[in-house]
DNA sequence: CTGTTAGCGCTTTCAC
DNA sequence: GTGAAAGCGCTAACAG
């Protein structure tokens, strides 16, 4: 016996009251006596009417209790990244108690037309891969919070990636200060280029540095190198399209095969640093004696690794919470969150 | 200049055609000439009308292109689990190309009222923590796919957890076959009990074994022990509420402090097995010589660990894909997926 | 406190 | 091919 499909109207008729009364019973307790309200609610429960249809309600009110979480790329890329996961956890932690649900959306899409009419707004985690989508989001007439990048006229949450990268590379280079050996640096970059390829990033490939985290970090690395008078030839920077063990291994192999072999690896994520460290150890290269490695993010696995990876720790969960708060407050603020240099045994 | 907010009606007026014509231009190409259609579409684009409002359209049609992914517990618990993430990746991989979006929903909720009117159905990853929700989902008049558990009258995707647990524990016990030493087994269980506590699972705590994966695995472990004539006293099984390093460590500590110390640890997830292995190594216990450890799931990290964890590998991504396929096909099938015993160095 | 009603933006049937 | 109109299920304003 499939339950009869009630509507507010039909249930009102059944109960012998007007539909406004039923609506009020569910939405505006102050509009009717407490007793009547409970009478109605329990009668509805009895009959199997669980409240006003949310789609219709939303159409009327224009609010949805759904927030779209826009991921940098397709949903499937993202979920494997522990940093992104922590971020999501933070967002959910803040939104769930408010009865707000999360809709996952791919940053690879051209536009948000399919979902824009179902959501109250967007939290955008990282610069979407599809540039069209960015324009679209800027033009949008809905609440938007950008995380780890900036969106004209919209709120944002960031850390100072430039400064963080600067500090962590300083740390990596410190050992060479008074030593006989010269630092020989390679950079394993994450999404420096808009491509799916693992490849070297020659200067002529690289567009003008923008506000993406990859470019900011690169600028920080370079600044540190420059201050230490260390040259970085333009065939010593790699692009990795995705923060995964497999891809990072390949890039690490390439970098470690260069002669003379680099003795410093600046990595744009801990996952990359870990992969590089594993590769090095497998090749019998001693870390940190023969090779110093730094990462970025501060994931648990990198701290548990032996040697623990020197890195920039950022609290992704807190970042998610702040982003959600910002979303709900509707303030168009630009938040800069703190980070922390964590010195491990890998430098 | 915020774009004027067009509606189908207003745009039709603007273009001097009827609203049916505009609607058809977007939804039913066969209802008007190709030329007229393109005329209309490009005029709309020009004016900044991106197509019919999806909320209104859904209200009318009753379809949404949104699927709710119901997680076992709050969204924040789940995202950190690599197995769950792979599953999600599989689902997304299948749904995204179809233009179907994923709405995340917490299995801790009482009911799906807040979202049921926005989605075409539910993919339910693991038995929801809240039992009320389960009843609700069974009664629902929408497409539902249950994963890693069963839901009366609904489609489902599973592996044979009982058999898998049986096989992996056989493997753990193999070494004791002709050896002088007796196997001394402890079980680190995942969500055996409906509680947030880390605690021993005495027989009188444990409800009748049900179809949840934890109970199925426990039954498989026990069967293997029984066949090998190994007693398992009822104070040697632990409940861990969540598959995380931190919680698992605590349980592992407890288990390893028991005198005489167990020499076999049957763990219900790789994350737990990893935590146990780390704890053991820190205590100077040799794995596998003094302690054999097996896990469950087959995550990368456990394979990269030294010693590699013996485990049951299941392809979570494929599981997600199959679940999504099943959802779209609307068949009420019960799928059983294969698994694979992976023998590492931990046994 | 209750009942009536307009209308959120759309799809679809029906007559033209 | 087009246009008029009903209605998806609801909320909120308004009059009683």
Image: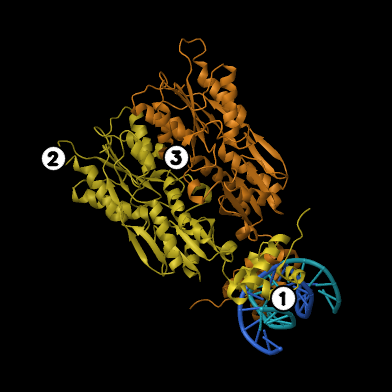
Chain colours: A orange, B yellow, C blue, D cyan
Helix, strand or loop under label 3: loop
Q: Nearer the viewer, residue A7 or C11?
A: C11
Q: Pinpoint residue A176: horizontal percent, then vertical percent.
A: 49, 14
Q: Are marks 1 and 2 on the same chain?
A: yes
Helix, strand or loop under label 1: loop
Residue beneath disc 2:
B178
Q: Which mark is residue A244?
A: 3
Q: Earlier in the sequence, mark 1 or mark 2?
A: 1
Quadrant of res A53:
bottom right
Q: Is residue B157 visible?
A: yes
Helix, strand or loop under label 2: loop
For discs 3 and 1, the disc positioned in front in the rendered view: 1
For discs 1 and 2, the disc positioned in front in the rendered view: 1
Residue at image coords 38%, 39%? B301
Q: Residues within 10 Å of mark 1 (few under 14, many from 20)?
A: some
**A191 on left or right of B3:** left
Residue beneath disc 1:
B18
Task: Say if B151 sits above or below A318 in the image.
Answer: below
Quadrant of res A161:
top right
Query: Residue most toward the front?
Result: B35
Q: Nearer the viewer, residue B35 or A295?
A: B35
Residue at image coords 47%, 24%? A344
Q: Chain of mark 3?
A: A
Q: Is residue A32 visible?
A: no
């Amino acid at each position: 016996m499939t339950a009869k499909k009630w509507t507010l109207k039909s249930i009102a008729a059944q109960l012998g009251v007007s539909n406004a009364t039923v609506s009020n019973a569910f939405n505006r307790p102050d509009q009717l006596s407490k007793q009547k309200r409970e009478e109605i609610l329990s009668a509805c429960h009895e009959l199997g009417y669980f409240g006003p249809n949310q789609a219709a309600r939303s159409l009327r009110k224009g609010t949805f209790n759904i927030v779209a979480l826009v991921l940098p790329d397709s949903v499937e890329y993202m979920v494997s990244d522990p940093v992104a996961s922590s971020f999501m956890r933070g967002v959910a932690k803040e939104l769930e108690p408010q009865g707000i649900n999360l809709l996952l959306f791919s940053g690879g899409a051209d536009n948000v037309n399919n979902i824009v009419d179902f959501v109250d707004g967007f939290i955008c985690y990282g610069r979407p891969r599809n540039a069209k989508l960015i324009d679209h989001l800027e033009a949008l007439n809905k609440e938007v919070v950008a995380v780890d990048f900036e969106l004209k006229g919209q709120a944002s949450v960031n850390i100072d990636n430039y400064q963080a990268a600067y500090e962590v590379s300083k740390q990596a280079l410190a050992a060479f200060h008074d030593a006989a050996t010269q630092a020989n640096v390679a950079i394993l970059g994450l999404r420096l280029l808009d491509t799916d390829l693992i490849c070297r990033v020659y200067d002529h490939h690289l567009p003008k540095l923008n506000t993406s985290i990859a470019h900011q970090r690169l600028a920080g690395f370079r600044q540190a190198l420059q201050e230490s008078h260390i040259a970085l030839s333009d065939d010593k920077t790699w692009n990795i399209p995705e923060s995964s063990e497999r891809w990072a291994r390949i890039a690490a192999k390439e970098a470690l095969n260069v002669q003379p072999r680099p003795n410093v690896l600046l990595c744009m994520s801990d996952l990359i640093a870990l992969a590089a460290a594993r590769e090095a150890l497998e090749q019998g290269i001693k870390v940190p004696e023969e090779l110093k490695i730094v990462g970025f993010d501060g994931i648990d696995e990198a701290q548990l690794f032996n040697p623990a990876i020197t890195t920039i720790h950022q609290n992704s969960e807190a970042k998610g919470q702040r982003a959600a708060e910002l979303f709900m407050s509707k303030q168009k603020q630009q938040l800069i969150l703190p980070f922390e240099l964590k010195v491990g045994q890998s430098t």
